[in-house]
Amino acid sequence: MPFLGQDWRSPGQSWVKTEEGWKRFSDDKNNNATESKSYCKDEEFYKENLLLAMSYDMAAKKRKKDLLNYNTKIPYFHKDKWIYVHKASTKERHGYSTLGEAFNRLDFSSAIMDSRRFNYVVRLLELIAKSQLPSLSGVAQKNYMNILEKVVQKVLENQQNVRPIKELLQTLYVSLCSLVQDMGKSVLVGNINLWVYRMESILLWQQQLDNIQINRPTSKGMTLTDLPACLQLNIMQKLSDGRDLVCLGQVCPDLNALTEDRLLWKRLCQYHFTERQIRKRLIISDKGHLEWKRMYFKLCRCYPRKEQYSDTLQFCTHCHILFWKDTNHPCTANNAESCCIPVSPQGFINLFKY
């Protein structure tokens, strides 16, 4: 039995692979010319196949590298749009779920195109930018930046939700400034030049958002100011952010007078904060009235506001799977809907804290 090892010092005779299989090659000088020619042809065929296989292998590796390259805009995604949340190793599963894995699997790139989920994803991106960015894997960090770029492009196109995106970019830039300074402590994945380039992109996006000029509608139909004052107040009561009321009051003097309504700001305070929180931050005017507008902004600085979203991620308490509401997940419960609870952005972060 010949020794077929790759070591050049191994004993035995030389063997070459041909179309008909492995053939023995002898170095005997008495071999005739036909055997020598046959060996040369077999050797050339073997070398040609070897080079061809190497080229195919290199091409496949290059395609895989290009797919995961930081310059590509193709997101890394999985076929299943859900993730099993497990925090410890079991007999059935080894390891635990991470925030980066969930970020890759749950297809946030498509979620931002849905107006019901847009604010939810933006809030989640902001929470990750504040404290969780170093915990993401390299692929998840790349996906984060690609999704952020899509968010900015969508805002530039439809000219909506400009303020929350500005706040998100500012939060991310401040976080990256501190993280890049600690680059030697391995807090970010990738070359520092790459992150400097990303910070420059963030500054460019901020400049583009600052230069947005909202065009007036071309239609000459009825506007908000044409409605009766009672209807205008009813519309203002649907706004859940006091900053929107302030911006609305800057349109014209009539709207400014309506936005100063004390009952409007009282409802905002009662919606976002508890009675105990309100009692701790009372502000009384010289006339003995409660300054609900000033109290609202003071409460916002002290306590988090109530968050409300049209569509959120769902968590199945029976099978411990995190998923979007319109996607199916392999649940074995008899009544799967009763086992599902909505997950807030902060709740999403807390699911992957260990």
Image: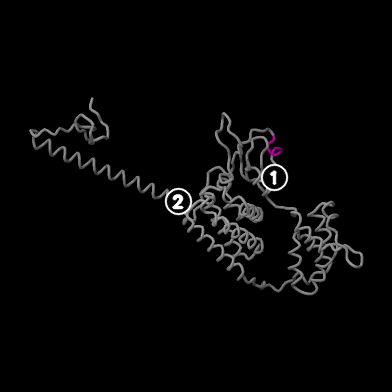
Few, some or many C-alpha atoms within 10 Å of disc 1 (few <14, some 14-19, many ≥20)?
A: some
Q: Is residue 320 above or below residue 177?
A: above
Q: Which numbered tag is attached to residue 342?
A: 1
Quadrant where the N terminus lies? top left
Which residues are drawn in magenta?
335-339
Q: Residue furthest right?
A: 288
Residue drawn at the location 26% of the way across and 42% of the way down: 49
Q: Is residue 336 magenta?
A: yes
333 sits to left or right of 96: right
Amino acid type, label 2: Leu
State whether the magenta stretch is mostly helix, strand or loop.
Answer: helix
Quadrant where the C terminus lies? top right
The tag earlier along the polypeptide, 1 or 2, is 2
Residue 99 lies in quadrant: top right
Q: Is residue 311 magenta?
A: no
351 sits to left or right of 75: right
240 sits to left or right of 109: right
